[in-house]
Amino acid sequence: MPASACQGFTADDVARECGDLLDGLRATAPLVQCLTNHVASGFTANVLLAVGAAPAMVDIPGEAGAFVAGASGVLVNLGTLNAAQPAAMREAAAAAHDSGTPWVLDPVAVGTLPVRSALAAELVQRRPTLVRGNASEILALAGSGTGGRGVDASVGVDAAHHAAEALAVQTGGAVAVSGPVDLVTDGTGIVRVANGHELLTRVTGAGCALGALMAAFAGLGADPVLAATAGSVVYGVAAENAAKQAGGPGSFASALLDQLAMLTAADVVARARIAVIR
Amino acid sequence: MPASACQGFTADDVARECGDLLDGLRATAPLVQCLTNHVASGFTANVLLAVGAAPAMVDIPGEAGAFVAGASGVLVNLGTLNAAQPAAMREAAAAAHDSGTPWVLDPVAVGTLPVRSALAAELVQRRPTLVRGNASEILALAGSGTGGRGVDASVGVDAAHHAAEALAVQTGGAVAVSGPVDLVTDGTGIVRVANGHELLTRVTGAGCALGALMAAFAGLGADPVLAATAGSVVYGVAAENAAKQAGGPGSFASALLDQLAMLTAADVVARARIAVIR
Amino acid sequence: MPASACQGFTADDVARECGDLLDGLRATAPLVQCLTNHVASGFTANVLLAVGAAPAMVDIPGEAGAFVAGASGVLVNLGTLNAAQPAAMREAAAAAHDSGTPWVLDPVAVGTLPVRSALAAELVQRRPTLVRGNASEILALAGSGTGGRGVDASVGVDAAHHAAEALAVQTGGAVAVSGPVDLVTDGTGIVRVANGHELLTRVTGAGCALGALMAAFAGLGADPVLAATAGSVVYGVAAENAAKQAGGPGSFASALLDQLAMLTAADVVARARIAVIR
């Protein structure tokens, strides 16, 4: 197996890479095509705009595949599959695979729900650059679990460690498991990120939007492990800053967007809580 | 006819029950499955997360019915019926009916609009635990009106009093009519709730989200009249608190989520403005 | 060609008309039917509610056409065409055309994307009262460009000047090109509006919601150029006020709604930055 992008690097090295990626994102405003659910689509686009990326929610058959050619990164999120989205997602994933455009699969609530689970299993064949989910979802997608009770994580991140590695080997990309301490692996290297705040679990679509942010970083051409790590760190530090200003989940969501816009690379380097496990 | 849950109780008794239900919701985080419109879905999920419930927006055919088995309560809101939602709503309502899972029907803008009106009439046969709407909608669903000019109430709550009672007798559940002073009835008992604030009418989906909150309380196993009353009181007191902080409808919506998160059972008991009419 | 509504008027005259339209909107609360995308639908409805209009998101086949009869204005936005929306949009545009109800077409990202581009070309035949878009979109719809890279404007407003005039002559209505300085033309007269703030480009759906606001003003029976100008000025002044309070794009979006609610006709007159070009 090849060495992972983070192997041999210190946590400080990785933090600097994350800061550089944030600067790179601001400099290039990557176009991120999102095929996502109707609950989180507005917040997702606002997260991308706040951080400095350019969202485009092109999610219909006949357009979704063609649009990939101009996109830097693509997000496919299975949260609420309307009648037309599965066909559009097949188009987009195929186009991303064939063109080498980085793409992120967010397998929301896969496991016992049959439509999305079958679609997720099919889409995995298109080798997503990144899969982002909670532990239940990663376990289910890797064939090791039933997906919990829906969108919230009922099992811990550590329980999905081996499933994440196996899934990453299968896709040839990286897998990010979200939780109190995120885990990112490409099957070889492992990075943990402790940034974040409990209030993220009180805002709908907070995880969905993180997937879009990871697609933006992957769209810069970053190694998948670094792209996912940068997403977790940038989002997590902004969330920590937002929580200091917030009186609850409503003002937190608003402050999170403000903090994503004002976060600097220096903040990222100073505040990152990264561990390079191997 | 059986006695209603609130008959023989004082307003203070009911207020204490509402406070207990809020504590119960925090203790158990009921999973509320929402099949709702694309305008209000984000805000609805955020209201549920803020108060302490767990939303899951599973709204597609082939999944919506099966998911009910693990849900505590279900919301079916007819606001923007995409191509697949009617089939999903039939599945979910049938599954809720057959399994005895509490479910709430929000018949948005029924009356002259033919697709949703026919679907609402069909879904009523599945005996929703609660129907929540404005006076125009309740009149139309009960067969006594044409539904006004859409989603806003052009007739007063009192005008829908008898229609609400008739509809409740038909469903065997309770009916909640939203307005300046909400009315809840199961055809026998009647409770009025004066909590709330005019700014709720300036936030899209505020009524839709209240339906989801009622589904959360019904999901605790509460009597339908109590579940609807608790929803109105909790939402109304939080809205009153939010209005004190707000500079307009935008900051109000954000503050409402903050206040829902910090509201205590003691606040509910102290601030409830309930009248047990009979 | 007939004289435009603004020809022979000074900028101050037009500003006073805009203020009067804001008062008229508050006095009559026009019902604005929106067929729009799932990303912006919540924010769009909140903008209408904040300013004092009444949104109704009736966007399904079998209902969208019939609802027009009771609506003051209609918005058709092509952002995320779900499986059923094209048929609903055909219904609504035909009904608006046939009944003389003012309607606004927002041709989001038309150009290279085939489904929406074909639909937009078809809908233009129903002679929209207003077309609102960025320069790339107006160029593409007028047959002079390819639409840029999606929803953000990659060409300047001035580049679309002649395309906007040609499109307005074709529809018999007005065309509004959004950018740092908006341009409104009916093919004869030209008005420029310099109000607004850069933070509007950091909030998803900000342009979509402006289209809805223009539909509200057109729904008052205003001349199309005046309706579009009033929309740009009211939105722009509110945005300038909101930016003073905001710490970033999240708090800006919330403050924009607050400011739309509290904006007065006198503010509009005093703060409008209008130029009547001819």
Image (tube, coloured by chain):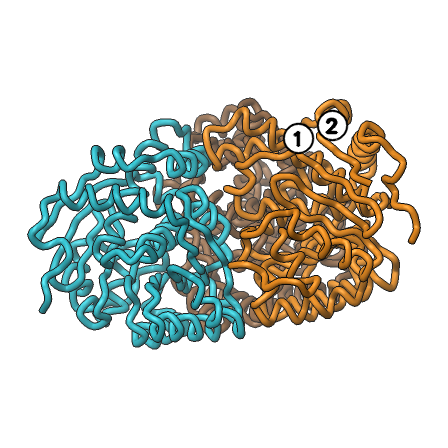
Chain colours: A cyan, B brown, C orange
Q: Disc 2 and disc 1: Cα gap in Å? A: 7 Å
Q: Percent position (x, y) of residue B214?
A: 53, 47
Identity of the amino acid at label 2? Val
Left/right placement of residue C28 relative to residue B55 reads right
On screen, residue C10 above or below A39:
above
A33 or B225, which lies in front? A33
Residue corresponding to mark 2: C268
Please rate how many residues cluster around mark 2, counting C-alpha atoms within 10 Å: few if below 14, some from 14 to 19, many from 20.
many
Q: Percent position (x, y) of residue C269?
A: 77, 26
Left/right placement of residue B148 relative to residue A113 reads right
Q: Percent position (x, y) of residue A26?
A: 37, 44
Going from N to C along the chain, the mark reached first, 2 or 1, is: 1
B137 or B152, which lies in front? B152
On screen, residue C81 above or below A229:
below
- At a point 35% along the width and 73% down the height, the residue shown is A123
Residue C70 makes an appearance in the image = no
Identity of the amino acid at label 1? Val
- At a point 66% along the width and 42% down the height, the residue shown is B178
Q: Chain of mark 2?
A: C
Q: Are marks 2 and 1 in contact (CB under 8 Å)?
A: yes
Q: Chain of mark 1?
A: C
Residue corresponding to mark 1: C237
Number of callouts in the render? Answer: 2
Secondary element type, mark 2? helix
- At a point 59% along the width and 71% down the height, the residue shown is C114
C191 or A275, which lies in front? C191
